[in-house]
Amino acid sequence: MVARPNFIELPSKDIDAARLFYAGAFGWQLTGFGPSYACTMTGDVDIGLQSDPAEVTAAPLAVIQVDDLEAAMLGVTTCGGRILKPIFGFPGGRRFHFADPNGNELAVMAVEPA
């Protein structure tokens, strides 16, 4: 199974301020997906800004891209990870969140073909 970090999601209390900051400081172009989410779309390691209080994580969220989401979930649970959010869809793919044995929240995603 291929697995690589491909996304980092940052909690953002004020998404407009965060978008202005990252665009100004680093020249990032952020695509909006509704009023509470925006992200870069470079195809490399991208950055997402999450401001929805129901979805925001307590710390930055590393996202690992895999080619087989179900196999990755089985591997996570078999090796002692705890599923925090079961598989769900989002624009462009599906993912789940888990806690590793130290309590760190991460996500695993698979890209859906267009």
Image: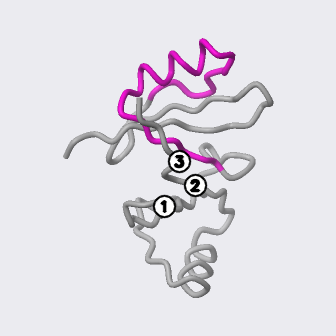
Mark 3 vs mark 2, foreground winner is 3
Front label number (1 vs 3): 3
Instruction: Tell me which amino acid carries mark 3.
Output: Pro
Q: Residue at x 54, y 45 (%)?
A: 63
Query: Label 2: which residue?
Result: 8
Q: Are marks 2 and 1 in contact (CB under 8 Å)?
A: yes
Determine which residue is flagged by label 3: 5
Question: Dot 2: within a 10 Å radius of its alpha carbon, few (fewer than 14), some, or many (20 or more) residues?
Answer: some
**Residue 45, image x and y in percent?**
49, 59
Q: Residue at x 46, y 27 (%)?
A: 87
**Picture quadrant where residue 89 is located:** top left
- Of 35 and 46, nearer the camera is 46
At numbered mark 2, what does the secondary structure look like: helix, strand or loop? strand
Contact between labelled residues 2 and 3, with CB atoms less than 8 Å apart: yes
Mark 1 Cα-neighbour bin, 10 Å: few <14, some 14–19, many ≥20:
some
Q: Which residue is mark 1?
A: 46
Residue 46 left/right relative to 79: left
Gap between marks 2 and 1 measured at Cα = 6 Å
Q: Is residue 62 magenta?
A: yes
- On the image, the x and y values in percent for residue 9 come to 58, 54
User: x%, y% of residue 25?
Assistant: 61, 85
Q: Residue furthest top?
A: 78
Please give the range of residues in magenta: 61-87
